[in-house]
Amino acid sequence: MRAQAKQLCRQVPTLLRILRRESDHLDWAPSETKWQPFARLCEYHQVTPFVFCQLKTSEKSPPAGLLEHLRRRFFEISARNYRLAQEAVDLASFLQQRGIVALAFKGPVAALAAYGDLALRQYQDIDLVVRDQDLLKTVNLLLLRGFKIATGSCRPDNGKDVSRNHEVTLAAPDKSYFIDIHWRLASERAGVFVPDVERMRDRVETVQLPAGSVSTFCREDLFVALCCHGAKHRWGRLKWLLDIAEILRSPVDLNWNRIETITSERPLARASTSLAIFLAHDLLNAPMLAALPNALEATARTRSVAEGIRAEIFTHGRTPGIDHNHTTLPELEGSIPAWIQYLWARYPRWFFEHAILRIDAKDRALISLPQQLDFLYHIVRPIRLVGKHSMRVARLAELSIRR
Protein backbone atom coordinates (compact mmCIF):
# COMPACT_ATOMS: atom_id res chain seq x y z
CA MET A 1 0.00 0.00 0.00
CA ARG A 2 2.82 2.41 0.84
CA ALA A 3 4.55 1.69 -2.46
CA GLN A 4 1.29 2.36 -4.31
CA ALA A 5 0.80 5.62 -2.42
CA LYS A 6 4.33 6.72 -3.35
CA GLN A 7 3.62 5.93 -6.99
CA LEU A 8 0.53 8.14 -6.88
CA CYS A 9 2.40 11.00 -5.17
CA ARG A 10 5.03 11.00 -7.89
CA GLN A 11 2.26 11.67 -10.41
CA VAL A 12 0.92 14.77 -8.61
CA PRO A 13 3.23 17.34 -10.34
CA THR A 14 2.29 15.93 -13.76
CA LEU A 15 -1.42 16.08 -12.97
CA LEU A 16 -1.18 19.64 -11.67
CA ARG A 17 0.60 20.79 -14.84
CA ILE A 18 -2.22 19.35 -16.94
CA LEU A 19 -4.87 20.98 -14.75
CA ARG A 20 -2.97 24.26 -15.24
CA ARG A 21 -3.37 23.72 -19.02
CA GLU A 22 0.40 23.21 -19.42
CA SER A 23 0.33 19.74 -21.03
CA ASP A 24 2.42 20.91 -24.00
CA HIS A 25 5.42 21.25 -21.68
CA LEU A 26 5.32 17.69 -20.31
CA ASP A 27 8.01 15.12 -20.98
CA TRP A 28 6.47 11.64 -20.94
CA ALA A 29 8.59 8.60 -20.10
CA PRO A 30 9.07 6.30 -23.08
CA SER A 31 7.78 3.27 -21.17
CA GLU A 32 4.04 2.58 -21.51
CA THR A 33 3.91 0.26 -18.52
CA LYS A 34 3.91 2.95 -15.83
CA TRP A 35 0.92 5.07 -16.80
CA GLN A 36 -1.56 3.19 -14.57
CA PRO A 37 -0.71 5.15 -11.35
CA PHE A 38 -1.37 8.40 -13.20
CA ALA A 39 -4.72 7.08 -14.44
CA ARG A 40 -5.64 6.02 -10.89
CA LEU A 41 -4.77 9.50 -9.59
CA CYS A 42 -7.02 11.07 -12.24
CA GLU A 43 -9.85 8.75 -11.22
CA TYR A 44 -9.44 9.50 -7.54
CA HIS A 45 -9.57 13.26 -8.11
CA GLN A 46 -12.36 12.83 -10.70
CA VAL A 47 -10.62 14.90 -13.37
CA THR A 48 -10.29 12.22 -16.08
CA PRO A 49 -12.52 14.00 -18.68
CA PHE A 50 -10.60 17.28 -18.37
CA VAL A 51 -7.22 15.50 -18.50
CA PHE A 52 -8.21 13.59 -21.62
CA CYS A 53 -9.30 16.73 -23.45
CA GLN A 54 -6.02 18.43 -22.54
CA LEU A 55 -3.85 15.49 -23.61
CA LYS A 56 -5.59 14.58 -26.87
CA THR A 57 -4.46 17.89 -28.40
CA SER A 58 -1.12 18.11 -26.63
CA GLU A 59 2.05 18.60 -28.66
CA LYS A 60 3.80 16.07 -26.39
CA SER A 61 2.07 12.74 -26.99
CA PRO A 62 1.35 10.73 -23.83
CA PRO A 63 1.72 6.92 -23.82
CA ALA A 64 -0.75 5.39 -26.26
CA GLY A 65 -2.14 3.06 -23.59
CA LEU A 66 -2.87 6.01 -21.30
CA LEU A 67 -4.58 8.02 -24.01
CA GLU A 68 -6.76 5.07 -25.01
CA HIS A 69 -7.73 4.45 -21.37
CA LEU A 70 -8.60 8.12 -20.88
CA ARG A 71 -10.59 8.15 -24.14
CA ARG A 72 -12.70 5.17 -23.03
CA ARG A 73 -13.34 6.67 -19.60
CA PHE A 74 -14.19 10.05 -21.16
CA PHE A 75 -17.02 8.56 -23.19
CA GLU A 76 -18.28 6.48 -20.25
CA ILE A 77 -18.33 9.52 -17.95
CA SER A 78 -19.81 11.76 -20.64
CA ALA A 79 -22.69 9.33 -21.23
CA ARG A 80 -23.41 9.16 -17.51
CA ASN A 81 -23.23 12.95 -17.16
CA TYR A 82 -25.79 13.51 -19.89
CA ARG A 83 -28.06 10.86 -18.43
CA LEU A 84 -27.91 12.44 -14.95
CA ALA A 85 -28.54 15.88 -16.46
CA GLN A 86 -31.67 14.45 -18.10
CA GLU A 87 -32.76 12.96 -14.75
CA ALA A 88 -32.17 16.29 -13.00
CA VAL A 89 -34.43 18.10 -15.48
CA ASP A 90 -37.13 15.43 -15.18
CA LEU A 91 -37.07 15.41 -11.36
CA ALA A 92 -37.07 19.21 -11.07
CA SER A 93 -40.01 19.39 -13.50
CA PHE A 94 -41.85 16.60 -11.64
CA LEU A 95 -41.49 18.48 -8.34
CA GLN A 96 -42.32 21.86 -9.94
CA GLN A 97 -45.65 20.47 -11.17
CA ARG A 98 -46.45 19.58 -7.55
CA GLY A 99 -45.66 23.00 -6.16
CA ILE A 100 -42.05 22.41 -5.07
CA VAL A 101 -39.24 24.59 -6.40
CA ALA A 102 -36.13 22.38 -6.50
CA LEU A 103 -32.87 24.13 -7.38
CA ALA A 104 -30.15 22.16 -9.16
CA PHE A 105 -26.80 22.33 -7.38
CA LYS A 106 -23.29 21.11 -8.35
CA GLY A 107 -23.41 18.37 -11.01
CA PRO A 108 -24.50 19.62 -14.47
CA VAL A 109 -24.98 23.27 -13.47
CA ALA A 110 -21.43 23.40 -12.06
CA ALA A 111 -20.17 21.73 -15.26
CA LEU A 112 -21.71 24.45 -17.41
CA ALA A 113 -20.62 27.28 -15.11
CA ALA A 114 -16.99 26.12 -14.95
CA TYR A 115 -16.36 24.40 -18.29
CA GLY A 116 -19.29 25.27 -20.54
CA ASP A 117 -19.57 21.55 -21.31
CA LEU A 118 -21.42 18.78 -19.44
CA ALA A 119 -18.82 16.21 -20.45
CA LEU A 120 -15.85 17.88 -18.76
CA ARG A 121 -16.91 17.62 -15.10
CA GLN A 122 -17.32 14.18 -13.60
CA TYR A 123 -20.22 13.87 -11.16
CA GLN A 124 -21.73 10.84 -9.48
CA ASP A 125 -25.20 11.88 -8.38
CA ILE A 126 -27.87 14.59 -8.53
CA ASP A 127 -28.14 17.41 -6.00
CA LEU A 128 -31.36 19.34 -5.54
CA VAL A 129 -32.10 22.06 -2.96
CA VAL A 130 -35.63 22.50 -1.59
CA ARG A 131 -37.10 24.57 1.23
CA ASP A 132 -37.04 22.81 4.60
CA GLN A 133 -40.85 22.92 4.80
CA ASP A 134 -41.00 21.02 1.48
CA LEU A 135 -38.50 18.33 2.49
CA LEU A 136 -40.87 15.61 3.71
CA LYS A 137 -43.28 16.14 0.80
CA THR A 138 -40.37 15.98 -1.66
CA VAL A 139 -39.02 12.73 -0.24
CA ASN A 140 -42.48 11.13 -0.11
CA LEU A 141 -43.09 12.04 -3.76
CA LEU A 142 -39.78 10.48 -4.76
CA LEU A 143 -40.53 7.37 -2.72
CA LEU A 144 -43.72 6.99 -4.75
CA ARG A 145 -41.53 7.08 -7.89
CA GLY A 146 -39.54 4.12 -6.61
CA PHE A 147 -36.63 5.86 -4.89
CA LYS A 148 -35.39 4.42 -1.59
CA ILE A 149 -33.80 6.29 1.31
CA ALA A 150 -30.17 5.20 1.44
CA THR A 151 -28.89 3.26 4.43
CA GLY A 152 -27.54 5.61 7.09
CA SER A 153 -29.11 8.70 5.54
CA CYS A 154 -30.95 11.38 7.49
CA ARG A 155 -34.62 10.48 8.06
CA PRO A 156 -36.88 13.30 6.81
CA ASP A 157 -39.66 12.35 9.26
CA ASN A 158 -37.34 12.69 12.27
CA GLY A 159 -37.28 16.33 13.39
CA LYS A 160 -34.09 15.97 15.41
CA ASP A 161 -32.37 14.30 12.45
CA VAL A 162 -33.45 17.08 10.11
CA SER A 163 -32.36 19.83 12.51
CA ARG A 164 -28.81 18.46 12.66
CA ASN A 165 -28.26 17.48 9.02
CA HIS A 166 -28.50 19.11 5.62
CA GLU A 167 -29.32 16.40 3.09
CA VAL A 168 -31.30 13.21 2.55
CA THR A 169 -29.78 10.66 0.16
CA LEU A 170 -32.05 8.46 -1.95
CA ALA A 171 -31.13 5.63 -4.30
CA ALA A 172 -32.68 5.58 -7.77
CA PRO A 173 -35.17 2.77 -8.54
CA ASP A 174 -32.54 0.98 -10.64
CA LYS A 175 -29.81 1.77 -8.04
CA SER A 176 -27.63 3.29 -10.76
CA TYR A 177 -27.32 6.70 -9.07
CA PHE A 178 -28.20 8.64 -5.94
CA ILE A 179 -30.02 11.91 -5.42
CA ASP A 180 -29.19 14.24 -2.53
CA ILE A 181 -32.05 16.44 -1.38
CA HIS A 182 -30.65 19.47 0.48
CA TRP A 183 -32.48 22.07 2.52
CA ARG A 184 -29.27 23.89 3.46
CA LEU A 185 -25.65 23.62 2.31
CA ALA A 186 -24.07 22.22 5.49
CA SER A 187 -25.06 20.63 8.77
CA GLU A 188 -26.33 22.89 11.53
CA ARG A 189 -22.95 23.09 13.24
CA ALA A 190 -21.20 24.18 10.04
CA GLY A 191 -23.97 26.49 8.83
CA VAL A 192 -21.98 29.56 9.82
CA PHE A 193 -19.38 28.66 7.17
CA VAL A 194 -21.73 28.52 4.16
CA PRO A 195 -24.10 30.96 2.43
CA ASP A 196 -27.70 31.29 3.59
CA VAL A 197 -29.87 29.35 1.12
CA GLU A 198 -32.91 31.53 1.74
CA ARG A 199 -31.00 34.66 0.70
CA MET A 200 -29.64 32.77 -2.32
CA ARG A 201 -33.20 32.08 -3.46
CA ASP A 202 -33.65 35.80 -4.09
CA ARG A 203 -31.07 35.56 -6.91
CA VAL A 204 -32.16 32.32 -8.63
CA GLU A 205 -31.46 31.92 -12.35
CA THR A 206 -32.55 29.48 -15.06
CA VAL A 207 -29.94 27.35 -16.85
CA GLN A 208 -30.58 25.54 -20.11
CA LEU A 209 -29.45 21.90 -20.19
CA PRO A 210 -29.69 19.68 -23.30
CA ALA A 211 -32.90 18.06 -22.01
CA GLY A 212 -34.55 21.23 -20.72
CA SER A 213 -34.11 24.02 -18.22
CA VAL A 214 -33.56 23.95 -14.45
CA SER A 215 -33.51 26.62 -11.78
CA THR A 216 -30.26 27.11 -9.94
CA PHE A 217 -28.29 29.65 -7.93
CA CYS A 218 -26.89 32.68 -9.72
CA ARG A 219 -23.29 32.37 -10.90
CA GLU A 220 -21.87 34.26 -7.90
CA ASP A 221 -23.86 32.27 -5.32
CA LEU A 222 -22.82 29.03 -7.02
CA PHE A 223 -19.17 30.12 -6.97
CA VAL A 224 -19.25 30.89 -3.24
CA ALA A 225 -21.14 27.67 -2.51
CA LEU A 226 -18.55 25.63 -4.43
CA CYS A 227 -15.75 27.40 -2.50
CA CYS A 228 -17.41 26.51 0.80
CA HIS A 229 -18.09 22.93 -0.27
CA GLY A 230 -14.42 22.42 -1.16
CA ALA A 231 -13.27 23.96 2.12
CA LYS A 232 -15.68 21.75 4.07
CA HIS A 233 -13.97 18.71 2.54
CA ARG A 234 -10.46 20.24 2.80
CA TRP A 235 -10.22 20.14 -1.00
CA GLY A 236 -9.97 16.35 -0.85
CA ARG A 237 -10.54 16.07 -4.61
CA LEU A 238 -8.77 18.31 -7.09
CA LYS A 239 -11.96 18.36 -9.18
CA TRP A 240 -13.44 20.85 -6.73
CA LEU A 241 -10.43 23.15 -6.99
CA LEU A 242 -10.42 22.82 -10.78
CA ASP A 243 -14.04 24.05 -10.79
CA ILE A 244 -12.90 27.23 -9.04
CA ALA A 245 -9.90 27.71 -11.32
CA GLU A 246 -11.98 27.27 -14.48
CA ILE A 247 -14.65 29.71 -13.28
CA LEU A 248 -11.88 32.25 -12.61
CA ARG A 249 -10.46 31.61 -16.11
CA SER A 250 -13.86 31.89 -17.75
CA PRO A 251 -14.55 34.81 -20.10
CA VAL A 252 -17.87 35.23 -18.27
CA ASP A 253 -16.95 37.67 -15.51
CA LEU A 254 -18.08 37.25 -11.94
CA ASN A 255 -19.77 40.20 -10.24
CA TRP A 256 -17.30 40.72 -7.39
CA ASN A 257 -19.44 43.39 -5.75
CA ARG A 258 -22.21 40.81 -5.46
CA ILE A 259 -19.76 38.22 -4.08
CA GLU A 260 -18.57 40.74 -1.51
CA THR A 261 -22.18 41.29 -0.44
CA ILE A 262 -22.86 37.54 -0.29
CA THR A 263 -19.81 36.82 1.84
CA SER A 264 -20.40 39.81 4.14
CA GLU A 265 -23.64 38.10 5.17
CA ARG A 266 -21.59 35.13 6.37
CA PRO A 267 -18.04 36.25 7.29
CA LEU A 268 -16.78 32.68 7.63
CA ALA A 269 -18.00 31.89 4.12
CA ARG A 270 -15.73 34.76 3.11
CA ALA A 271 -12.74 32.94 4.64
CA SER A 272 -13.59 29.75 2.69
CA THR A 273 -13.92 31.76 -0.54
CA SER A 274 -10.60 33.48 0.03
CA LEU A 275 -8.92 30.12 0.66
CA ALA A 276 -10.37 28.67 -2.56
CA ILE A 277 -9.19 31.61 -4.69
CA PHE A 278 -5.70 31.49 -3.21
CA LEU A 279 -5.38 27.69 -3.62
CA ALA A 280 -6.66 27.83 -7.21
CA HIS A 281 -4.02 30.45 -7.98
CA ASP A 282 -1.23 28.68 -6.09
CA LEU A 283 -1.80 25.11 -7.31
CA LEU A 284 -3.59 25.57 -10.64
CA ASN A 285 -2.28 28.97 -11.77
CA ALA A 286 -5.77 30.50 -11.89
CA PRO A 287 -5.69 34.27 -12.45
CA MET A 288 -5.56 36.48 -9.38
CA LEU A 289 -8.03 39.07 -10.59
CA ALA A 290 -7.46 42.79 -10.14
CA ALA A 291 -11.17 43.18 -9.35
CA LEU A 292 -10.88 40.95 -6.29
CA PRO A 293 -12.27 42.81 -3.23
CA ASN A 294 -9.81 43.49 -0.41
CA ALA A 295 -11.98 41.43 1.93
CA LEU A 296 -11.25 38.31 -0.16
CA GLU A 297 -7.48 38.69 -0.25
CA ALA A 298 -5.60 35.90 1.53
CA THR A 299 -4.60 36.63 5.12
CA ALA A 300 -1.63 35.09 6.91
CA ARG A 301 -3.94 32.48 8.39
CA THR A 302 -5.48 31.64 5.02
CA ARG A 303 -2.00 31.21 3.53
CA SER A 304 -1.02 28.97 6.46
CA VAL A 305 -4.04 26.71 5.92
CA ALA A 306 -3.35 26.66 2.16
CA GLU A 307 0.26 25.66 2.76
CA GLY A 308 -0.89 22.74 4.90
CA ILE A 309 -3.28 21.57 2.19
CA ARG A 310 -0.58 21.96 -0.48
CA ALA A 311 1.87 19.88 1.57
CA GLU A 312 -0.71 17.11 2.03
CA ILE A 313 -1.42 16.93 -1.69
CA PHE A 314 2.26 16.69 -2.63
CA THR A 315 3.10 14.29 0.21
CA HIS A 316 0.10 11.98 0.11
CA GLY A 317 -1.51 12.70 -3.25
CA ARG A 318 -4.64 13.96 -1.47
CA THR A 319 -5.85 15.59 1.74
CA PRO A 320 -7.77 13.71 4.46
CA GLY A 321 -10.82 15.90 3.85
CA ILE A 322 -12.96 13.18 2.27
CA ASP A 323 -12.81 11.15 5.48
CA HIS A 324 -12.77 14.05 7.96
CA ASN A 325 -15.29 16.74 7.01
CA HIS A 326 -15.12 20.22 8.56
CA THR A 327 -11.54 19.87 9.85
CA THR A 328 -10.43 22.90 7.83
CA LEU A 329 -13.25 25.24 8.81
CA PRO A 330 -12.14 26.02 12.39
CA GLU A 331 -8.64 26.79 11.12
CA LEU A 332 -9.85 29.70 9.01
CA GLU A 333 -9.83 33.31 10.07
CA GLY A 334 -11.62 33.91 13.38
CA SER A 335 -13.53 30.67 13.08
CA ILE A 336 -13.60 29.17 16.56
CA PRO A 337 -14.67 32.30 18.52
CA ALA A 338 -17.12 33.31 15.79
CA TRP A 339 -18.52 29.79 15.51
CA ILE A 340 -19.16 29.58 19.26
CA GLN A 341 -20.75 33.03 19.28
CA TYR A 342 -22.89 32.16 16.26
CA LEU A 343 -24.11 28.86 17.71
CA TRP A 344 -24.94 30.47 21.05
CA ALA A 345 -26.92 33.26 19.38
CA ARG A 346 -28.57 31.28 16.56
CA TYR A 347 -29.04 27.84 18.09
CA PRO A 348 -29.10 28.25 21.89
CA ARG A 349 -31.09 25.05 22.37
CA TRP A 350 -28.63 22.99 20.32
CA PHE A 351 -25.62 24.66 22.00
CA PHE A 352 -27.06 24.09 25.48
CA GLU A 353 -27.86 20.45 24.71
CA HIS A 354 -24.48 19.57 23.18
CA ALA A 355 -22.19 21.62 25.41
CA ILE A 356 -23.90 21.08 28.77
CA LEU A 357 -26.81 18.64 28.89
CA ARG A 358 -25.35 15.75 26.92
CA ILE A 359 -23.08 13.43 28.92
CA ASP A 360 -21.01 10.75 27.20
CA ALA A 361 -18.34 8.15 27.99
CA LYS A 362 -15.50 10.65 27.57
CA ASP A 363 -16.95 12.87 30.32
CA ARG A 364 -17.26 9.91 32.66
CA ALA A 365 -13.75 8.73 31.78
CA LEU A 366 -12.30 12.10 32.80
CA ILE A 367 -13.50 11.72 36.39
CA SER A 368 -15.41 9.01 38.24
CA LEU A 369 -18.30 10.31 40.33
CA PRO A 370 -20.76 8.41 42.52
CA GLN A 371 -24.30 8.15 41.19
CA GLN A 372 -25.68 10.75 43.61
CA LEU A 373 -23.21 13.31 42.18
CA ASP A 374 -23.97 12.47 38.55
CA PHE A 375 -25.34 15.98 38.01
CA LEU A 376 -21.78 17.34 38.33
CA TYR A 377 -20.95 15.89 34.92
CA HIS A 378 -22.90 18.83 33.46
CA ILE A 379 -20.12 21.02 34.86
CA VAL A 380 -17.35 18.59 33.90
CA ARG A 381 -18.45 18.43 30.25
CA PRO A 382 -17.99 22.13 29.30
CA ILE A 383 -14.66 22.15 31.14
CA ARG A 384 -13.54 19.09 29.18
CA LEU A 385 -14.66 20.61 25.85
CA VAL A 386 -12.83 23.87 26.58
CA GLY A 387 -9.68 21.91 27.41
CA LYS A 388 -10.04 19.78 24.30
CA HIS A 389 -10.11 22.80 22.00
CA SER A 390 -7.81 25.12 23.94
CA MET A 391 -4.69 24.22 21.93
CA ARG A 392 -6.42 25.01 18.66
CA VAL A 393 -7.75 28.30 20.02
CA ALA A 394 -4.25 29.21 21.24
CA ARG A 395 -2.78 28.43 17.83
CA LEU A 396 -5.38 30.59 16.08
CA ALA A 397 -4.72 33.43 18.53
CA GLU A 398 -0.98 33.17 17.84
CA LEU A 399 -1.64 33.43 14.10
CA SER A 400 -3.82 36.49 14.67
CA ILE A 401 -1.00 38.20 16.56
CA ARG A 402 1.48 37.40 13.79
CA ARG A 403 -0.86 38.79 11.18
Image (cartoon, rainbow, N blue to C red):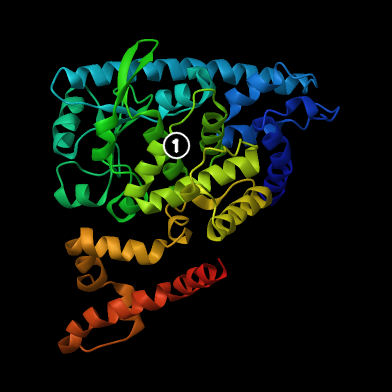
Which residue is nearer to you in this view: 45 or 220?
A: 220
Side (left or right) of 306 relative to 263: right
- Residue at 68 percent across and 52 percent down: it is 315
Q: Residues within 10 Å of mark 1 (few under 14, many from 20)?
A: some
Q: Is residue 79 above or below residue 246?
A: above
Q: Residue 104 falls in which quadrant of the image? A: top left
**Mark 1 lies on residue:** 256
- Measured as percent of width and height from the top left, residue 284 is found at 63, 38
Side (left or right) of 64 relative to 315: right
Q: Residue 52 falls in which quadrant of the image? A: top right
Furthest residue in direction top, as rendered:
211
- Measured as percent of width and height from the top left, residue 145 is found at 20, 21
Say whether residue 225 is visible: no
For numbered disc 1, what is the local secondary structure? helix
Q: Residue 376 falls in which quadrant of the image? A: bottom left
Q: Amino acid at mark 1?
A: Trp
- Residue at 74 percent across and 43 percent down: it is 10
Which residue is nearer to you in this view: 143 or 95?
A: 95
Q: Is residue 321 above or below residue 93?
A: below
Say whether residue 165 is visible: yes
- Residue at 46 percent across and 45 percent down: it is 273
- Residue at 60 percent across and 24 percent down: it is 50
- Measured as percent of width and height from the top left, residue 160 is found at 17, 52
Q: Which quadrant does the C terminus fall into? A: bottom right
